[in-house]
Amino acid sequence: GCPHEIGVFLGFPCQDVKAFMEYQEKISGARSRSQVERGPKLLLNGYWKVYHNPDLASDIFRRYDLARMMVMLVMLDPRWVLKVFAYPPAAEP
């Protein structure tokens, strides 16, 4: 797999990346699941596991969904590229 830190570069909130990494370290260092105390409270699960600020995460999830939809539209109809790059429309002089 890829390092968990990549989440920071993908726009995941640092607090969530840190909480996930710390919990993964506890799990990997334990001999059994029973030795691991409960991890941080999972508030939301989407593109990543959200442990802090679910409102911010929900907003980012919506933005990722929109970006994904735009990429799919461009792949299905390349003329959409012109529309994507024309948004927001340039102000007329």
Image (cartoon, helix red, strand yellow):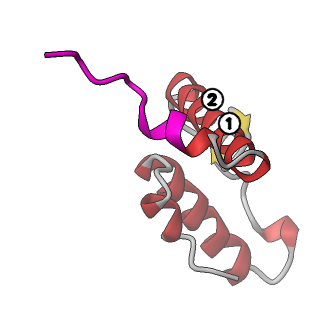
Residue 91 is covered by the magenta coloring:
yes
- Residue 57: x %, y % from top left: 56, 33
Quadrant in the picture for the C terminus:
top left
Residue 36 vs 12, above or below: the answer is below
Residue under the image location 52 percent in, 57 percent down = 17
Q: Position of residue 42 (x, y in %)?
A: 70, 39
Image position of 15 (left or right of 62): left
Q: Is residue 65 left or right of residue 15?
A: right
Which residue occupies the extreme left position in the image? 93
Q: Residue furthest top?
A: 92
Residue at the disc numbered 1: 65
Residue 54 colored in magenta in the image:
no
**Along the viewing direction, whichever of 66 and 49 lies nearer the viewer:** 66
Q: Which residue, given by chain and number where applicable, does mark 2 sit on?
A: 62
- The quadrant in which residue 90 appears is top left
- At 42% from the left and 52% from the top, the residue drawn is 14
Residue type, mark 2 in image = Arg
Reply above or below: 21 against 89. Answer: below
Q: Which image quarter: residue 68?
A: top right
Q: Dot 2 lies on which element?
A: helix
Stretch in magenta:
82-93
* Above-or-below relation of 75 to 89: below
Marks 2 & 1, CB-CB < 8 Å contact = yes
10 relative position to 61: left or right = left
